[in-house]
Image: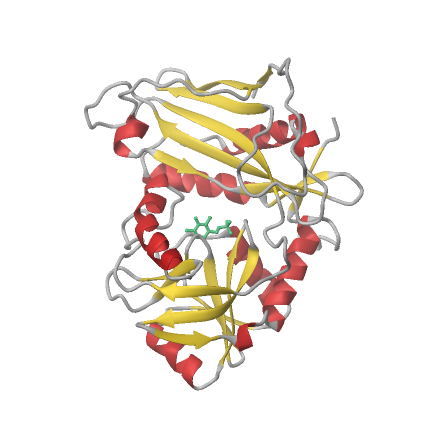
Amino acid sequence: MDIRIERTATPAQKPDSTKLGFGRYFTDHMFIMDYTPDKGWHDARIVPFANISLHPAATVFHYGAEIFEGMKAYRREDGTVQLFRPMENVKRMNSSADRLCLPLLDEEDALEAIKKFVEVEQDWVPSNPGTSLYLRPFLFGCDEQLGLHTLQNAMFVIIASPVGSYYAAGINPVKIMIETEDVRAVKGGTGYTKCGGNYAASNRAGARAEANGYSQVLWLDGVHRKYIEEVGAMNVMFRIGDEIVTPDLSGSILPGITRKSCLEVLRNEGYKVSERRLSVDELVEAMENGTLREAWGCGTAAVVSPIGELAYQGKKYTVNNFEIGEVTQHLYNTLTGIQWGKIDDSYGWTVEIPKA
Ligand SMILES: *Cc1c(COP(=O)(O)O)cnc(C)c1O
């Protein structure tokens, strides 16, 4: 794939890397590629970061034809920049595209686009502990008509944002509310995709949880309102007795790359791991009889996020004395160790970016 590169004449001042937050600053450039039925994907380019101009009837504004990915570029201590399992993001993006009838990407081309873009922006990858360059690839429909029909035209864009450590004040257990009214997804729907509409539909429950002092909701399945699905925009795992349980990928849960990596590490190290249905009743019982030892969310942004309190139907349950658990901490150390190059990547998960 040919990627045209047009560098900005006015590079931005880089923000103070101790005050990055999440998604507030953007790098100097962006990657763009267009899709039309006659040319397929074409005109791949890395150009100065700028607004995108779209027809007011563009499909994305009206019918939500949009999918995205979230991944990070990490700076190792020796200065090298690396990605973590980027092909997994590319494959998931295509799975999302397929569900929403958006055009699929050539996987090798998409990976090359991500790598070339990070290579161009590598000075933007911060080096303070826990910081990284968050990458946001997204793909949307832009047909210029209001009729509902099979999509014809689309754009694939990648932007990047230097982000701070999720745990600026150290790893902190969070309070989670089990949501009993709204649902996030149902089997047969779009729950397994990263499509924008899923997040719009989650906002109300998230806002209610926040207003009540909780940081996220834990979703139950949309049919029985009984089985655990995931937490906000993270997958969820529980250590009950000597078993580590996570909901199986039944179609309504997002197949997280952090989830997959945690499972691979745990199985490789001989832990007893089950991907299975877990009912909220079984969880409540485990909290009441003391067999729930740890609970954590997992996703790219936080890596792992220990759960210190769960609320269900007005009752509050403290998990592991509101402390980070042993397995949670171990997964955090292992994954962040590989991502920032502090421990040996025996799984072959990292992809180095050539130095400029
Ligand atoms: C992105 C996301 C996750 C986590 O996926 P990772 O690949 O681990 O970052 C989990 N649940 C939802 C709903 C998500 O959007």
Instruction: From the top left corner, tell me how far across and down residue 345 is, in percent.
Output: 71, 52
Instruction: From the top left corner, tell me how far across and down residue 336 is, in percent.
Output: 66, 54
Q: Quadrant of residue 55?
A: top left
Q: In this view, does 318 lie above or below 351?
A: below
Q: Name the side, left or right, on which 243 lies relative to 349.
A: left
Q: Nearer the viewer, residue 171 or 97?
A: 171
Residue positioned most to the bottom: 289
Is residue 70 visible in this depiction of the protein? yes
Q: Name the side, left or right, on which 348 lies relative to 94.
A: right
Coloring basis for residues: secondary structure
The residue lying at 59 percent from left, 69 percent from top is 324
Q: In this view, does 354 lie above or below 173?
A: above
Q: Tell me the quarter of the image containing the N terminus.
A: top right
Q: Is residue 237 above or below residue 291?
A: above
The residue lying at 62 percent from left, 72 percent from top is 326
Residue positioned most to the left: 147
Q: Which of 191 and 99 is in front in this view?
A: 191
Instruction: From the top left corner, tell me how far across and down residue 114 is, in percent.
Output: 57, 32
Is residue 270 visible in this depiction of the protein? no
Instruction: From the top left corner, tell me how far across and down residue 211 is, in percent.
Output: 37, 57
Q: Tell me the quarter of the image containing the C terminus.
A: top right
The residue lying at 37 percent from left, 69 percent from top is 277
Q: Is residue 343 above or below residue 355?
A: below
Q: How many marks?
A: 0
Residue positioned most to the right: 78
Q: In which quarter of the image is residue 171?
A: bottom right
